[in-house]
RNA sequence: UCCAGCGUAGCUCAGUGGUAGAGCGGGCGACUGUUAAUCGCCUGGUCGUAGGUUCGAAUCCUACCGCUGGAGCCA
């Protein structure tokens, strides 16, 4: 439109705009919001990396540029040219003195963009997840998720772990308990979507030493809570010759590394997510070592809490902890707490018994602070052929299906340990979110598979 | 599967037996520093569905449907 605009204005992103202070740049993105005050317009642009406010005084731009922006509808796509200026009044520190704008597609006003800056309910937003993710808070969460995933892989890659992803289609249940998604598999009978790659990475660990897997897992449980998805991502390391102590050290260093990376890259995003307040402070305390609590110590803590009226139900010794129990325990600490050596009876068949007390399993749950629940579950695995076979039979599992798994104890068995971390719960905790449905681009929950 | 709560305008909600409401959104207008801008006017509804009680039902009762999050189970 305006012929004065230099065609060569460099293209940049809003996140990097500070490097171009005083220069005229181009941004490609969308109109996020528009305020007007007479002959002065305040359009807010977004480009996926952040948002920036533009300033358009009527006297300073070509009339058609002013008119185009004044009439522009929210979420219309555009390329904007303008000069970057530092401004104390701007939340991000920079503003754009708009010189020109070129609209790629104009949203018609009879069908306006449905997500406004006001409040909406979860059903309305999830039905429009493909649009909701354009809002600054949702975009920020997805950026943090990406960093968490990258940091998690980087942690293992730089420690010489080999990534070995297990199959997603499996012939039988790994643990025999969870509800599985079932499907027909040609003439081979039924197949199931994996609920954990653990048994498979035990095999790859005995081949390659230190391994991890990273991919989606599926649980058909009818859980409708803020902590549950039917499809979620899990990263699972498995280490030959590692015992429970090694595993707990690995877990606390792993989580510390992830938090460090998020703090390095996402101060602004964390502020956007928590709505202004600088909640990054609570993450600065997250550093190894983490507090450790045996099952017995945790039980005693709950016992005392009940007698003081701090929790509603008494914890029965020998039972697993319920969600309110986990919340209480985690609230006693300012960093993740590692609860180890649960009663073997409430844990999976493949967990190694504690030599000090055969009724306990060499396992650990890492509970995130603030009631976000179990983000990591792991254990030392049974390495004796005879014991593992007996456990399979005791749990009523079909021995034929586990022959390959028993082979791992038949040929050069060693002590080995591993854990799994649910990415979504980790993101929810680090970002301080109400619900895991916001931690993944398209959440799959009990009664939603659209969009 | 069980328990609880909620379904009223495009959105968020108020209205609890007597003529259907507000804010936001959308439209028109005013405003040169707004931050979910503000101000004026306009627009907008088979009160989830079906049945019942009543002179009269958004409101009370029953069933069903949908949503929400809590238990169990789990990451």
Image (cartoon, grey):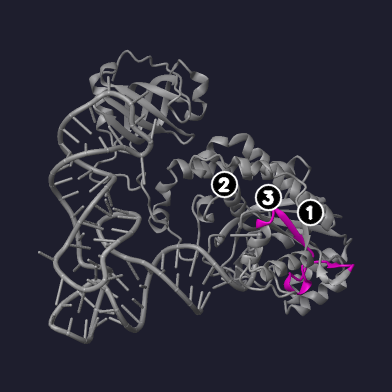
Q: Which residue is painted at 52% across and 40% down in the image? A: A277
Q: CA distance from mark 1 to mark 3?
A: 18 Å
Disc 1 packing (10 Å; few <14; some 14–19; many ≥20): many
Q: Which numbered disc, 2 or 1, marks the residue that appears first in the sequence?
A: 1
Q: Quadrant of residue B33?
A: top left
Above or below residue A203? Residue A322 is below
Q: Quadrant of residue A247?
A: bottom right
Of residues A242 and A327, the one nearer the viewer is A327
Give the overall secondary structure of the magenta segment. Answer: loop
Is A152 left, or right, of A82 in this rendering? right
Subunit of label 1: A
Q: Which residue is painted at 68% across and 71% down in the image? A: A307
Q: CA distance from mark 2 to mark 1?
A: 24 Å
Which one is in front in this view, the residue at disc 2 or the one at disc 3?
A: 3
Q: Say if mark 1 contacts mark 3, CB within 8 Å.
A: no
Q: Which mark is residue A248?
A: 1
Residue A166 in sight from this viewpoint: no
Magenta includes A354? yes
Q: Which mark is residue A266?
A: none
Q: CA distance from mark 2 to mark 3?
A: 15 Å
Q: Can you give x and y, in whole percent of width and height, for residue A299 in the image?
A: 74, 68
Q: Can you give x and y, in whole percent of width and height, for residue A8 in the image?
A: 42, 16
Disc 3 packing (10 Å; few <14; some 14–19; many ≥20): some
Subunit of label 3: A
Which structural element holds mark 1? helix
Residue with the mark numbered 2: A431
Residue A3 in sight from this viewpoint: yes
Above or below residue A140? Residue A183 is below
């Amino acid at each position: 439109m305006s012929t004065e605009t230099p065609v060569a204005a460099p293209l940049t992103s809003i996140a990097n705009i500070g490097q171009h202070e005083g220069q005229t740049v181009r941004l490609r993105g969308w109109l996020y919001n528009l305020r007007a005050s007479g002959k002065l317009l305040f359009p807010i642009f977004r480009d996926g990396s952040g948002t920036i406010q533009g300033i358009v005084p009527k006297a300073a731009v070509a009339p058609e540029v002013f008119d185009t922006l004044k009439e522009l509808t929210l979420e219309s796509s555009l390329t904007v040219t303008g000069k970057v200026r530092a401004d104390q009044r701007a939340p991000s520190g920079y503003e754009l003195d708009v010189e020109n704008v070129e609209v790629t597609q104009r949203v018609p006003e009879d069908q306006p963009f449905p997500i406004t800056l006001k409040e909406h309910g979860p059903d309305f937003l999830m039905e429009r997840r493909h649009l909701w993710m354009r809002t600054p808070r949702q975009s920020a969460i997805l950026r943090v998720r990406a960093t968490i995933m990258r940091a998690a892989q980087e942690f293992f890659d730089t420690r010489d772990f080999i990534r070995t992803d297990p199959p997603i289609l499996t012939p039988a249940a790994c643990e025999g308990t969870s509800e599985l998604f079932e499907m027909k598999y040609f003439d081979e009978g039924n197949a199931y979507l994996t609920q954990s790659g653990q048994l498979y990475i035990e095999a790859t660990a005995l081949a390659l030493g230190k391994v991890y897997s990273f991919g989606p897992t599926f649980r058909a449980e009818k859980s409708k809570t803020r902590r549950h998805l039917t499809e979620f991502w899990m990263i699972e390391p498995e280490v030959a010759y590692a015992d429970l102590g090694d595993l707990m050290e690995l877990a606390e260093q792993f989580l510390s590394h992830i938090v460090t990376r998020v703090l390095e890259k996402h101060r602004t995003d964390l502020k956007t997510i928590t709505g202004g307040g600088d909640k990054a402070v609570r993450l600065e305390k997250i550093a190894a070592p983490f507090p450790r609590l045996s099952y017995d110590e945790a039980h005693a803590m709950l016992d005392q809490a009940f007698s003081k009226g701090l929790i509603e139900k008494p914890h029965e010794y020998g039972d697993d902890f319920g969600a309110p129990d986990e919340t209480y325990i985690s609230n006693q600490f300012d960093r993740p707490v590692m609860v180890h050596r649960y009663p073997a009876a409430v844990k999976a068949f493949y967990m190694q018994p504690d030599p000090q007390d055969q009724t306990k399993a060499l396992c650990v749950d890492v509970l995130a602070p603030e009631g976000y629940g179990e983000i990591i579950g792991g254990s030392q695995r049974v390495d004796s052929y005879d014991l593992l076979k007996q456990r399979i039979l005791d749990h009523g599992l079909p021995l034929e299906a586990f022959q390959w798994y028993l082979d791992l104890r038949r040929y050069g068995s060693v002590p080995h340990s591993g854990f799994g971390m649910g990415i979504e719960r980790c993101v929810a905790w680090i970002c301080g979110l109400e619900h895991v449905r916001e931690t993944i681009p398209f959440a799959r929950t009990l009664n939603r598979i659209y969009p």
